[in-house]
Image (tube, rainbow, N blue to C red):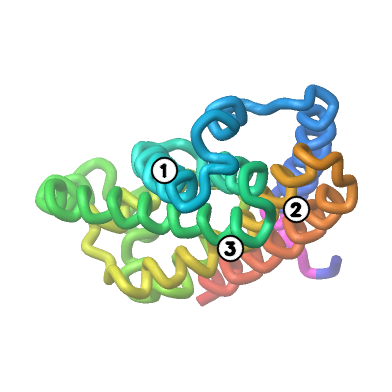
């Protein structure tokens, strides 16, 4: 890969490790026949019709709003409802959780954030904040597509910094989608012993990570 910088190789190495971990985790969960949260899903969500779907979306939204990894929500969505419906419901929950965290931070923390950006945290956070303010859709999309980073931290940072809401939410929806489908495939694969779902999940993971890295490098070059 000509022209790849040392930091680029490090990022590719991290993604390779994450992909290997994804495979190992999926195989381990399939061997165990269970995963964290599946007992709750079996008791209150699966085979409960619209009520189960509503309970899943509301509980998962609150969970992601306070920092539960969105990949866990997608996994349980795939486990409970299958890939298509599970991905759709998980994505709805993730977006609702994103909006809750963003709006809470925007309502209570704008003044505090500005003071910190002008203080000791400014040199580290201001470049990211300025990039998000200038390009809320494309910058947020790049960060969402990467398999690293903290979903809650980005939601709060966006709200605290007054980043435009609609482009940020639209980019989040689009950026959430690949990993949501990936982990819904894993959840479905664990439940039905589907090796092909796990293989497809790893392939989508690689494509999503590469696209996110490419977008991020474009922003850095700009």
- Determine the image quadrant of residue 84: bottom right
Task: Find the distance from the CA under tag 2 to the CA under tag 3.
Answer: 21 Å
- Determine the image quadrant of residue 162: bottom left
Side of 47 where 124 appears, left or right: left
| Percent x, y of residue 142 | 54, 65
Q: Which residue is tagged 2?
A: 12
SS class, disc 1 = helix
Asked whether disc 2 touches disc 1, contact meaning CB atoms under 8 Å apart, the reply is: no
Residue 4: say if magenta. yes
Task: Find the distance from the CA under tag 1 to the CA under tag 3.
Answer: 21 Å
Task: Find the distance from the CA under tag 2 to the CA under tag 1.
Answer: 38 Å
Residue 80: say if magenta. no
Q: Quadrant of the N terminus?
A: bottom right
| Percent x, y of residue 90 | 52, 53
| Badge number at residue 40 | none
Q: Magenta region: which residues?
A: 3-8
Q: Which residue is tagged 3?
A: 177
Camera-near label (1 vs 3) is 1
| Percent x, y of residue 10 | 72, 48
Decide which of 184, 45 is in the foreground and name it: 45
10 Å crowding of disc 2: few (<14), some (14-19), many (20+): some
Count of numbered marks: 3
Q: Which residue is tagged 1?
A: 55
Query: Can see residue 152?
Result: no
10 Å crowding of disc 1: few (<14), some (14-19), many (20+): some
Camera-near label (2 vs 1) is 1
| Percent x, y of residue 32 | 79, 22
| Mark closer to the chain start, 1 or 3 | 1
For the point 31% across and 52% down, which residue is it?
A: 157
């Amino acid at each position: 890969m000509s022209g790849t910088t040392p930091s680029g190789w490090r990022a590719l190495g991290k993604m390779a490790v994450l992909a290997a971990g994804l495979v190992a985790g999926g195989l381990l969960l399939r061997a165990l026949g269970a995963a964290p949260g599946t007992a709750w899903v079996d008791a209150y969500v699966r085979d409960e019709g619209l009520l189960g779907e509503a309970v899943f979306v509301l509980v998962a939204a609150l969970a992601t709003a306070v920092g539960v990894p969105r990949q866990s929500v997608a996994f349980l969505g795939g486990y409970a409802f299958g890939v298509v419906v599970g991905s759709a419901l998980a994505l709805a929950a993730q977006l609702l959780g994103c909006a809750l965290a963003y709006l809470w931070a925007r309502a209570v923390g704008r003044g505090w954030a500005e003071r910190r950006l002008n203080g000791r945290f400014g040199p580290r956070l201001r470049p990211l904040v300025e990039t998000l303010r200038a390009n809320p859709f494309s910058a947020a999309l790049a960060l969402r597509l990467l398999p690293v980073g903290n979903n809650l931290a980005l939601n709060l940072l966006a709200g605290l910094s007054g980043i435009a809401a609609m482009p940020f939410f639209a980019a989040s929806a689009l950026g959430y989608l690949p990993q949501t489908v990936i982990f819904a495939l894993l959840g479905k694969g664990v439940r039905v012993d589907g090796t092909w779902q796990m293989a497809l999940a790893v392939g989508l993971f690689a494509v999503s990570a590469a696209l996110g890295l490419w977008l991020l490098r474009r922003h850095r070059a700009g």
